Amino acid sequence: MAIVSIVGAFTARGMLVMLFLPFSALDKILNFRQAVGQAAEAVANRSLATVLILAGLGVELFMSLAVLTGVADRMAALILAAYCVVTALLWKQFWKTPDFRLRGTSRGREVFWDFLKNLALGGGFLVLAFGASANGVEQFLAHPWASSHPYTLSRG
């Protein structure tokens, strides 16, 4: 039964980060120029766009690995939550689309759903960072770099 619990915890964490590791990180590597081009749509300076893509790649790789391994996973989850919100605000700007409609074909509505998915994923990372209880933020602030020890089973 212990192995089922550990595999379940790993699977849940894997599902939470799978967008970033391997898929988005690999996409940034394989299509680096296109990624920089997309980032350049949000910031005017191409050098800054390159830095943003490299920073995003670092966040996606290292924070995802931290969540998977349980090493400083709570801080990594907080960073990934912030990353989700920032990317939603920078690249999922549904309010700027000229065709936002509730019925019929609408690119704006598609971007709106992507925006909400980013926020929902960020919320999942916040639950991982703070736990599901009301005192989780206080516990996080007391020990922000602590691991949640996701693969340790308590006996009792």
Image (cartoon, rainbow, N blue to C red):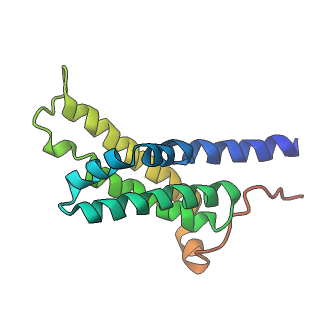
Q: In this view, which residue lies farthest toward the bottom? A: 142
The image quadrant of residue 42 is bottom left
Q: Which residue is rendered at x = 27% and y = 49% of the image?
A: 37
Question: How many numbered discs, if any?
Answer: 0
Q: Which residue is rendered at x = 50% and y = 45% of the image?
A: 26
Question: Image height check: is 25 above or below 66?
Answer: above
Give the left or right position of residue 144, taking residue 149 as reference. left
Residue 88 image point, x, y percent? 32, 50
Give the left or right position of residue 12, taking residue 108 as reference. right
Residue 133 image point, x, y percent? 58, 60
Residue 142 image point, x, y percent? 59, 80
Q: Which residue is rendered at x = 45% and y = 43% of the image?
A: 30
Question: Image height check: is 21 above or below 113?
Answer: below
The image quadrant of residue 117 is top left
Residue 114 image point, x, y percent? 34, 39
Residue 74, can we see it? Answer: yes
The image quadrant of residue 136 is bottom right
